[in-house]
Amino acid sequence: MTLGMARDHLRTARALSERPLVAEAFERGQLSYSKVRALMRLDDDFDEQLMLACAGYASASQLETIVRGCRR
């Protein structure tokens, strides 16, 4: 694992501790790591229910595009 990848894993794991609904969906296998990683790039004030709704209908690639649009 590269240093950048390890940092990305740690950042995602730390952010998951602040998003209990996303963490629960990830534990149940409803979200892939790629989707969780994309969702964790959103601001802290972003609604978790909305995150899960987007993630449920979009592929990981589509979700990355959505998150990029939300961050602008």
Image (cartoon, rainbow, N blue to C red):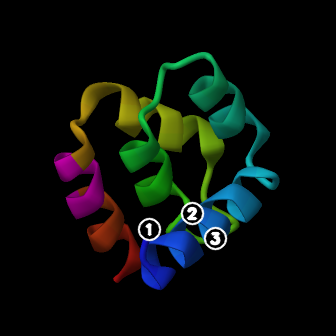
Q: Residues within 10 Å of mark 3 (few under 14, many from 20)?
A: some
Name the front one of labels 1 and 3: 1
Which kind of residue does numbered mark 2 sit on? His
Q: Residues within 10 Å of mark 2 (few under 14, many from 20)?
A: some
Report if the CB atoms under discs 3 and 2 are less than 8 Å apart.
Answer: yes
Name the front one of labels 1 and 2: 1
Q: Which mark is residue 47?
A: none
Q: Which residues are magenta?
A: 61-65
Badge 2 element: helix
**In-image side of 30 versus 20 (left or right):** left
- Label 3 – label 2 distance at C-alpha: 6 Å
Q: Quadrant of the N terminus?
A: bottom left
**In-image side of 39 versus 54 (left or right):** right
Which kind of residue does numbered mark 3 sit on? Arg
Report if the CB atoms under discs 1 and 2 are less than 8 Å apart.
Answer: yes
Say which residue label 1 marks.
1
Please tell me which of labels 1 and 2 falls first in the chain: 1
- Identity of the residue drawn at 51% across and 40% down: 50
The x and y percentages for residue 19 are: 74, 48
Asked if residue 63 is among those painted magenta in the image, a careful observer would answer yes
- Identity of the residue drawn at 37% across and 26% down: 56
The x and y percentages for residue 18 are: 80, 55
Say which residue label 3 marks.
11
Q: Please, what is the dominant secondary structure of the magenta stretch?
A: helix
The quadrant holding residue 72 is bottom left
Badge 3 element: helix
Which kind of residue does numbered mark 1 sit on? Met
